[in-house]
Amino acid sequence: MKTKTTTFFAARTAAEQVAPRFALALLGATTTIALLAHDARSQTVTQPITVTATPEDEAITVPNAEEAKKRIEKTAGGVDIVPAEEVRDGRANSVKDILDYVPGVFAQSKYGQEDSRLSIRGSGLSRNVHLRGTRILRDGIPITDADGAGDTMEVDPLTVDYTEIYKGANALQYGASLLGGAVNFVSPTGRSNPGFLLRQEFGSFDSMRTQFGAGAALGNYDYYITPTYSHSSGFRDHTDQDYKRLNGNIGYRFGDGAETRFFLSAADINQKIPSSLTKAQALSNPQQTSPNSFIGNTKRNIDSLRGANKTTFLTDSGEVTVGAFAARKDLFHPLFGGFNRVLDHYEENGGGFARWTDEQQLAGHRNETTLGVNVFGGRLEAKQFNNVSGSRGALLSDADQISRTWEVYGENAFYVLPTVALIGGLQGTFAYREYHDEFLGDGNASFKRNYDSINPKLGSRWDYAPQQQAFANLSWSTEPPPFSELGTTGVQSDIRAQESKTLELGLRGRTGDVAWDAAVYRAWLQNELQFQTVNNITNVFNADKTIHQGLELGGDWTALRDLAATGDRLALRGAYTFSDFRFDDDAVYRDNDIPGAPKHVLRAELRYSHVSGWYAGPNVEWVPQGYYVDNANTLKTEAYALLGAKAGYDFGGGLKVFIDGRNLLDKAYISNTSVAATATAASTLFNPGDGRAVYLGVEYRW
């Protein structure tokens, strides 16, 4: 196999070879004109756009949800935004609760808040721990590690003001060029959320959650801080959890034109971990776990601290944002059974970024430019010990994993008509991986790898009516393998970067009582990171060619108004995702389905809201057919439908209460799976979902 990382697919048609050059030319030409225009504002050919001062109740560094929605809808592709109000009206326990109604996103928890699988358009399906293929950000600043892997458990949905979802190359404004794109969790500030907050939740499985929040704007300063605590005994045996998390920020405004903000987050997570089960075990007795969970005291404890700064300067026609971040994490992770180890990791990550946006009139046409650079670096001290009743035994391995990533990106939107924009973008990634073996008793497995790529994007957006858009784009992306892939192969030297090109078409908008979001896409992948078994050993390999394609439909409809009282309404919202992920004439797996995600997922809610402040209604999660859990397509999950219901009351004066019922029919189902090359009925790949549960909550703001 070739060891050299290629920038583009080896066999590319003439049209595909021309597209990157055209994107580069378009971007370069329009950006050059924009820069010249920026330096010559006094000339009559340019008509600068005046940027008004930011209101006192809005932060410059962290736009409020309304402003963020205006910005994100300029994207010529699949994006979404979820405000906190859509999450806090019930139990908000994991990222699944945020992303349930975003089509194209498959988010499922294993148990509690631990290790939610997050896959967008089939990204990272070979992993259900330590996700990859989607960049996770907080306030536009990466949480994802420098090697591209990441976790969601440090994100508490209660500490998020709104969430932005950028699918695929639509995340270019943050420099990301990945199949899954990016998810950005945005914090409240003292300007967007002044005052105090107290929230308390109780419910099934001895669950208890507490949140306190405080924020204020004091002249040029503002601050917001929110500690949270969560405890649960868990639905399954050996899933006790205690989460202590702290998030806060403080900002200082330099007049009307600039602001700097410091962010701090910390987490102390103690999570017991049950075993995965066979399919029969998971459906017949979903609360059980293997005795090995108790023998090895399996758990995942994390102690993390993260600090960041972001400073934004408003210009006459745009803004400049610069920033830096640093993070450290301790992981103590005893495992038992087939992998009898204690993972003892200490990790440091950091980096910096700069982004410039500008809007000008060019030859009488509107033109928007974004240029940016990201620099990330990280070092993981990875030790493994023999597991002796959950404690460290003999040292089995010791390695330093060093990652560095540089990203340079730009995007330009030129409006050929007031309602039609042509978009050219380009992103370059320079990634470095170094594995330094410190445990030489079994040989020296040290290595160094470079993964460089250039990823163009072409697109257009047509605002064909007020609040209504059509869009299309063609984009390339590259995903260098994280150490979670390189390490599992025994430092396999021929693992290459995963590459893809994606064509996307879509519509979104609102008219009257109806809002919609629809997209269809097809992605051609090469070198997708997958599992294979050779001589009874399972490891990672690069699949030759694979295809990801799908349909994403979302929206809401106020079906009836003024039913029982003036101002009341009956509304339906939903999200449907069709996913078709498959190998493409593979030598071993032919045209088999890629395992790990269902073909069809539907989430829907019908809610009645009364003008006096109360609301109530049922909801459903429906997976109408099971999906494969192995590349050989020998073993499937089962279909399921989960019925829930939610009700609440706003007393006014800041006091709200809710009741949230989950899986009310107590359906046994598979919520999350690992995947394998070939599976049998004895394969322990399945994680059952929670049984019937009811949660009560009260929230008071003053």
Image (spheres, rainbow, N blue to C red):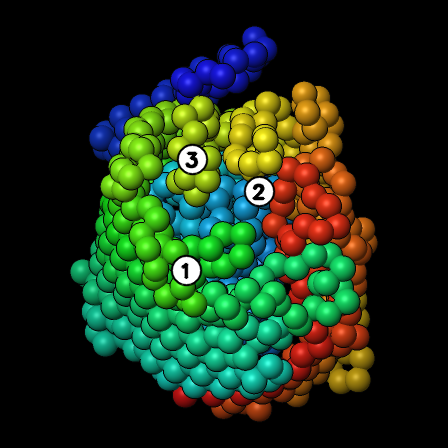
Where in the figure is residue 643, as x and y percent of width and height?
A: 77, 71
Residue 126, label in figure: 2
Q: Residues within 10 Å of mark 3 (few under 14, many from 20)?
A: few
Amino acid on which disc 3 is placed: Gly
Amino acid at the residue labelled 2: Ser
Q: Position of residue 671 (x, y in %)?
A: 67, 60
Q: Which residue is mark 3?
A: 490
Q: Which quadrant of the structure image shows residue 607?
A: bottom right
Tag shown at residue 387: 1
On screen, residue 448 versus residue 413, left or right, reads left
At horizontal 39% and vertical 82% (from top left) the residue drawn is 212
Label 2 CA crowd tier, 10 Å (few <14, some 14–19, many 20+): many
- Can see residue 99? yes
Q: Secondary structure at mark 2?
A: loop
Of discs 1 and 3, which sits in the foreground? 1
Residue 353 visible in the displayed image: no
